[in-house]
Image (tube, grey):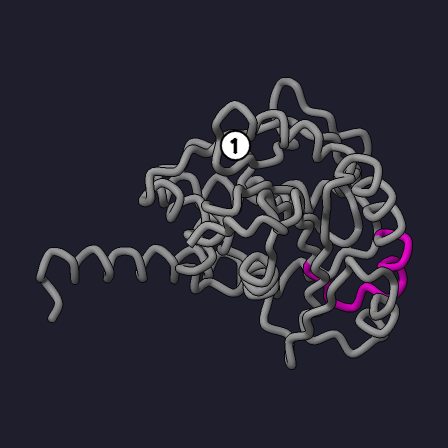
């Protein structure tokens, strides 16, 4: 159900975190300053600590009354953290952004403008002829991301060029419809969101955003590469099974 409460903030920002104690305070300072100047009628930040063993949650607690911390008891994955935050949010618009702010929070203005044209979901885009990447990733991470994106687009017939960008905006209606249905906890959750949006008839748009590589990635090249592709295959099998059941092939 879409949040129609009169006291709902204009903007919710969901920040999934895992072991981010070294930069979470600076990120909170940047986000709160930006939101305060842009959304005087109300905003909130939901930091979802995905089972960190460092001081991520401790540093955020008490930072600002408009910043809430939700702690998952164990590390479940970015998909689980974003889902938790989106469903806990109250904002009319809801942004997911990475804790490293590789895309500066000020880029939110571009996504909000596009949402104002009727888009239910706006995906930040880093690649393409009008790319605004100022500091690229190392070549091996670029390759891993491009191959993963290409395989996913082929498997699911998705036309969007940068499904994995961690900067995405949802209307409250879209967030509640999609994240009330998602099941993928890790790497393929972006594709699951896009596929659910297509199934629900929601309008998805892409918007070029500024992006800079930030050191300190939690992605492990070998182990996570295998996990990423396995998650795509599992999602494909799950969708095939659901389709077959709807057609009555599987009891």
Q: Residue furthest bottom?
A: 73
Q: In the rendered image, which quarter is residue 152 located in? A: top left
Q: Is residue 18 magenta?
A: yes
Q: Residue at x 47, y 57 (%)?
A: 179
Q: Which residue is mark 1?
A: 161
Along the viewing direction, whichever of 89 and 16 lies nearer the viewer: 89
Q: Residue at x 63, y 61 (%)?
A: 222
Q: Which residues are magenta?
A: 16-27
Secondary structure at badge 1 equals: loop
Whole-percent x and y of residue 132? 73, 25
Quadrant of image for the C terminus: bottom left
Q: In the rendered image, which quarter is residue 226 located in? A: bottom right
Along the viewing direction, whichever of 145 and 55 lies nearer the viewer: 55
Q: Residue at x 64, y 75 (%)?
A: 72
Q: Residue at x 84, y 66 (%)?
A: 60
Q: Is residue 71 magenta?
A: no
Look at the image and tell me whether residue 218 can be seen.
Answer: yes
Is 251 placed left or right of 94 in the picture?
A: left
Whole-percent x and y of residue 164? 58, 45
């Amino acid at each position: 159900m879409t949040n129609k409460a009169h006291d709902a903030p204009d903007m919710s920002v969901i920040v999934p975190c895992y072991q981010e104690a070294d930069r979470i305070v600076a990120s909170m300072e940047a986000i709160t300053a930006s939101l305060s100047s842009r959304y005087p009628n109300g905003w909130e930040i939901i930091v979802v600590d995905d089972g960190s063993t460092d001081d991520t949650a401790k540093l955020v607690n008490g930072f600002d009354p408009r910043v809430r911390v939700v702690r998952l008891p164990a590390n479940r994955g970015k998909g689980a953290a974003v889902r938790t935050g989106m469903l806990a949010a109250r904002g009319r618009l809801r942004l997911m952004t990475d804790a490293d702010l590789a895309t500066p929070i000020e880029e939110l203005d571009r996504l909000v403008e596009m949402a104002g044209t009727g888009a239910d979901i706006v995906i930040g885009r880093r690649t393409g002829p009008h790319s605004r990447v100022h500091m690229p990733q190392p070549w091996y991470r670029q390759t891993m991301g491009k191959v993963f994106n290409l395989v996913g687009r082929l498997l699911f017939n998705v036309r969007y060029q940068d499904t994995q960008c961690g900067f995405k905006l949802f209307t409250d209606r879209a967030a509640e419809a999609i994240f009330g249905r998602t099941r993928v906890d890790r790497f393929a959750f972006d594709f699951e969101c896009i596929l659910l949006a297509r199934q629900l008839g929601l309008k998805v748009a892409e918007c070029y955003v500024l992006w800079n590589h930030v050191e300190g990635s939690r992605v492990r090249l070998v182990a996570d590469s295998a996990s990423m592709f396995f998650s795509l295959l599992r999602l494909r099998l799950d969708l095939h099974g659901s389709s077959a059941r709807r057609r009555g092939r599987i009891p």
